Image: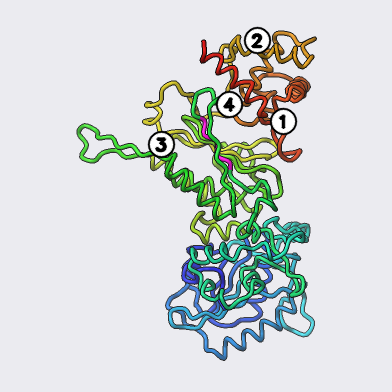
Amino acid sequence: MALPINIEELINGNTVEWERIEFRKGWNPERTIKTITAFANDFNNWGGGYVIIGIKEENGKPKLPPEGLKVEEIEKIQKDLNKICRKIIPNYFPIVEPVNFMGKNILILWCPGGSVRPYKCPENFTKNPRYFYYIRRFSSTVKPTIDEEKELIAMSNQIPFDDRVNYRYSLKEFDLGAIKTFLNKVKSELENQIPNLTIEEISRKMNIAEGSDENLLPKNVGLLFFGKNPQRIFPSAQIEVVIFKDKDGIEFEEKIFDGNLMEQTLNVLNFLKSQIVKEKVIKREGKAEADRFFNYPYQALEEAVCNAVYHRGYDNDSPIEIRIYPEHINIISFPGPLPPLNREKLKKYQFDVRKYRNRRIGEFLKELHLTEGRQTGIPTILKELEKNKSPKPVFETDEERSYFKTTFFIHPEFKRESEGVNEATPQDSAELELSWDQVGTKLKSRFEDLLHHEGVSDGVNEGVKERLIEEIVFLKNNHAIKRADIEKIFKVSKATAERDIAFLKKLGLIKFVGAPKTGKYVITEKGKKFLEDNEQEKGNE
């Protein structure tokens, strides 16, 4: 049998961080059971880890070529594993794979995060041993502190959404072709064995299903990556790209990238690379080499998109949004970052992330070489922007951490070429304001006609009318808005913002989409037509 991973890249630390790998020259059951327990507890939602037996560790790295194991040693270790793993409470069994690597036999223990944590195991194998919890701290297996143990116990049965079993669907949802494509891309030996395996065996080998043989059910990560129609199960699991072509945001093009997570991620990255990223070459007087730079460095965009795919919540109603304006790009995902990250730390580029919302999605993305190791995404973005001499990005969230937004600003040399476009500056986009001159008297007249037609014109003074029109135009330009944004941008109270929203909803110009806590207001088709008709009237004058 084979694991759904490239063994050479695993051993060399290319697809799994060193903190998640332990190398053992030989078999030490007491030490190994503690490490297995620690990986099963998956205290940081990293996705567990690997114990590789038959390779000596030297300064935290594998010493190659491996010393290897004898066949009879491997057989004994597997028998011992069956015994000692029954001592883990509750029982936990890693996925065990004998591998021939560089001409030597080694044994790989894949220890995914367990589904019924917390786990504990005996401190030793004496007659009446004491049982303890174990966790990973950096590259070591340790007993948790008192506070860590309390936190671990509080995580009881709190399994990240992507690694949960989905009881509503069956393995029939899996697309074998998508599984083959993935295994081919990561160069896993498991691809060659697929013709001889059942879908149940494949699912267990890839840890994308869980349960007894008679009730084996898919995990959410399997349905997201290998489902025949993931959007039927997770309607918001898609990426929406909106390209604004004019300064007012009236003319735009929308593209939706769906399918499984591998397809949509690769497709949207290909679109950005081929359609959005542009290179400029300038020959400077007195310099032998020309200056080369991009409007947006692709590597930075790639990292931001993959971060959004990795860290977004798949149990809410909001897709990933990529808004491409003439001079800046917003990449938005919902909800926002987990504590301790907050608005202040994002502004200072302080990314001390410890826990992760999804633990399996990151594994698959890293296997596909679509994302770097943990806590390396933002540094990669900053490095690529600096290398391209681009402005620094802006990372945003709100007090409730309901969204995470990354804003990239166009390279100054490309900005100089632009004519008649919005001047995007590195600031909180919610601080952008509108003037009444941008709205126009024609639109005001048409708005008054609409109020009369709906029979709601009484009691609406001129100032309220102007503000309502400004709000709908702002929403058209910025695609979505929250009540708090209206308060800040238009300098009104919470009660006034709520009245404005209720009024615009009553007119049918806006609607609410998404979950109650993380949703937002978007313009309706009626609202779009209202503004488009005004533009057509202006064009005919």
The magenta-colored residue range is 240-244
Question: Was residue 242 drawn as part of the magenta stretch in this picture?
Answer: yes
Is residue 143 visible in the rendered image? The answer is no
**Toward the viewer: 363 or 467?**
467
Which residue has dot 1 on it?
511
Q: Residue furthest bottom?
A: 72
Q: Nearer the viewer, mark 2 or mark 1?
A: 2
What numbered label is drawn on residue 445? 2
What residue is drawn where x is 59% and y is 66%? 176
Question: What's the distance in space between the residues labelled 1 and 4, CA to CA?
Answer: 16 Å
Report the side of 68 relative to 196 (left or right): left
Give how far across and how far down residue 485 sits, in percent: 67, 27
Which residue has dot 3 on it?
295
Q: Nearer the viewer, mark 2 or mark 3?
A: 2
Q: Which quadrant of the rendered structure holds the N terminus? A: bottom right
Q: Earlier in the sequence, mark 4 or mark 3?
A: 3
What residue is drawn where x is 46% and y is 23%? 421
Could you tell me which secondary element the residue under label 3 belongs to? loop
Q: Nearer the viewer, mark 3 or mark 1?
A: 1
Q: Earlier in the sequence, mark 2 or mark 1?
A: 2
Give how far across and how far down residue 507 sits, in percent: 74, 22
